Image: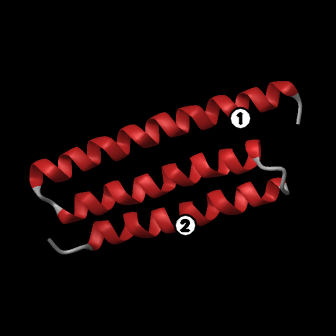
Amino acid sequence: MGLGLTTLVTVLKTVTLLLGGAITYFAYEASLRTHSRSIRLLALGFGVVTVGALLAGFVDTLLHVDPLLALVVESGFTVVGFAVILYSLYAEE
């Protein structure tokens, strides 16, 4: 991957972490204000997706393993996070 693409991926991952972290934080704060279990689950789901992006970045950047492993890590966390988000939309209070 060229230096330009590496920089672009780094910038996009950083923005993803900032936005995901902000969504997670504000959803969690909303769950505390409203005492809503479903909003707390929503925050958890976004947190899982965000942590997955962070861990994938670490795996890809710091570990000397197959780059596909980073994709597997991120995809796994994304699947779990989206499942929690989906459940949060149907959870009874």
- Amino acid residing under circle 2: Val
As drawn, the residue found furthest toward the left would be: 34
Where on the picture, by quarter, is residue 5? Answer: top right
Q: Is residue 20 left or right of residue 26?
A: right
Q: How many residues crowd around disc 2 within 10 Å: few (fewer than 14), some, or many (20 or more)?
A: some
Q: Identify the element where label 1 is drawn.
A: helix
| Foreground pick, 39 / 73 | 73
In the drawing, what numbered circle is on residue 75? none
Residue at the extreme right: 2
Residue at 61%, 66% (x, y): give it: 76
Determine the CA span between mark 2 and mark 1. Answer: 21 Å
**Secondary element type, mark 2:** helix
Which quadrant of the structure image shows residue 73?
bottom right
Give the residue type at disc 1: Val
Which residue is depicted at the point 54% across and 39% down? 16
Residue 9: image tag: 1
Residue 33 percent location from the top left of the image:
11, 48
Q: Residues within 10 Å of mark 1 (few under 14, many from 20)?
A: few
Residue beneath the point at 47% across and 62% down:
81
For the residue pair 85 and 76, the one nearer the viewer reads as 76
Q: Quadrant of the N terminus?
A: top right
Q: Position of residue 68 (x, y in %)?
A: 80, 58
